[in-house]
Every structure is written in structure tokens, then in C-alpha cells.
């Protein structure tokens, strides 16, 4: 998306580009799922049961492979959508720092603007998990 200077706007249902907006069908947008609700019928993939819809999605994904992220290095923050985590009256949980040499990866994520420094009462140590090579 950075290469084409475009942003995905799910509220408007379009891909915003310098040349203009490209609408996409709302039925292919990801459905919101509450964390406390594990009902599979609410999950996005259940909306794609029809073979035609699956083929249409495959074509869309193939046509836009150059704007989809496949590497961690491509991931960044967005200012298109803002969210907040409502904690109510809950108190922060204290997590003690772990003795792991993760500073290089954290520095890289800071450089890519994927994370930001925080001194909030809700701040806790970052946990980096190495993915299994497959």
C-alpha cells in the first residue's frame, strides 16, 4: 500500500488512492467479532461459504498482492482508524520485565513505527515470540 500511496478505508468501504477511490463490496469486509463471543457464525470466513464468493475473493487478493503485507517489515501503524481499549475501573496488572535480549527487535519495531514508547500505568513488557520456520 505504501508503494501505491493508498489507504484502506473500511468505514467508507473503499481503497483510497491518488487516482480516486476504489470501492469494494461490503460483504467481503471483515466482520467484527467480540472477544467474549466465540460463535463461528460471526467470524468473517463464514460469510464466504459460496464458491463464487471464494473465487471472487481469491481474484481480489491476487490482483492486490502488491499492496498486501506478507512480511513483518511491512507492518506499520495507521491513522485511518483509531481505537481505544475501554478498561473501565479495572486496575493495571503488574508484569515484571523478563531477562531477554530483545532490544534489537524492539529498536527495529520503533524504527518502523510499529510500536511506540509508553509510560502508562497499563504499559507492560513486550513479549516477542519466535515463529516456527515452515
Image (cartoon, rainbow, N blue to C red):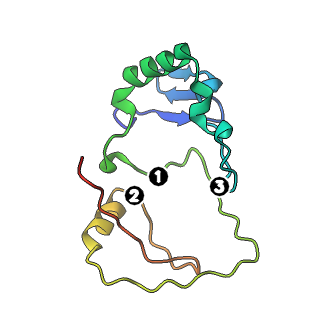
- Nearer to us of marks 2 and 3 is 3
All told, the count of numbered labels is 3
Q: Which mark is drawn over residue 8? A: none
For residue 71, side relative to residue 123 (left or right): left
For residue 17, side relative to residue 86 (left or right): left
Mark 3 = which residue?
Answer: 35
Which residue is drawn at the image coordinates 66% and 46% (left, top)? 33
Dot 3 alpha-carbon crowd within 10 angstroms: few under 14, some 14 to 19, many 20 or more: few
Which residue is drawn at the image coordinates 57% and 22% (left, top)? 24
Mark 1 = which residue?
Answer: 77
Q: Distance of mark 3 from mark 1, alpha carbons? A: 22 Å
Q: Which mark sits nearer the N-terminus, 2 or 3?
A: 3
Q: Which mark sits nearer the N-terminus, 1 or 2?
A: 1
Q: Which mark sits nearer the N-terminus, 3 or 1?
A: 3
Out of 27 and 64, give the one closest to the viewer: 27
Q: If the image is split into quadrants, where does the N terminus sit?
A: top left
Dot 2 alpha-carbon crowd within 10 angstroms: few under 14, some 14 to 19, many 20 or more: few
Write down the quadrant of residue 44 in the picture. Answer: top right
Mark 2 = which residue?
Answer: 113
In the rendered image of this protein, does residue 45 appear above or below residue 99?
A: above
Q: Secondary structure at mark 1?
A: loop
Amino acid at each position: 500500500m505504501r508503494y501505491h500511496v493508498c489507504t484502506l478505508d473500511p468505514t467508507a468501504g473503499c481503497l483510497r488512492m491518488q487516482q480516486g477511490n476504489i470501492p469494494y463490496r461490503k460483504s467481503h469486509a471483515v466482520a467484527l467479532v467480540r472477544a467474549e463471543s466465540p460463535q463461528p457464525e460471526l467470524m468473517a470466513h463464514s460469510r464466504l461459504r459460496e464458491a463464487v464468493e471464494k473465487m471472487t475473493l481469491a481474484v481480489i487478493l491476487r490482483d492486490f498482492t502488491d499492496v498486501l503485507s506478507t512480511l513483518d517489515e511491512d507492518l506499520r501503524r495507521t491513522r485511518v482508524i483509531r481505537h481505544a481499549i475501554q478498561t473501565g475501573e479495572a486496575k493495571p496488572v503488574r508484569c515484571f520485565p523478563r531477562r531477554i535480549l530483545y532490544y534489537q527487535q524492539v529498536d527495529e519495531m520503533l524504527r518502523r513505527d510499529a510500536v511506540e514508547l509508553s509510560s502508562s500505568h497499563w504499559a507492560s513488557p513486550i513479549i516477542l515470540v519466535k515463529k516456527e520456520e515452515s
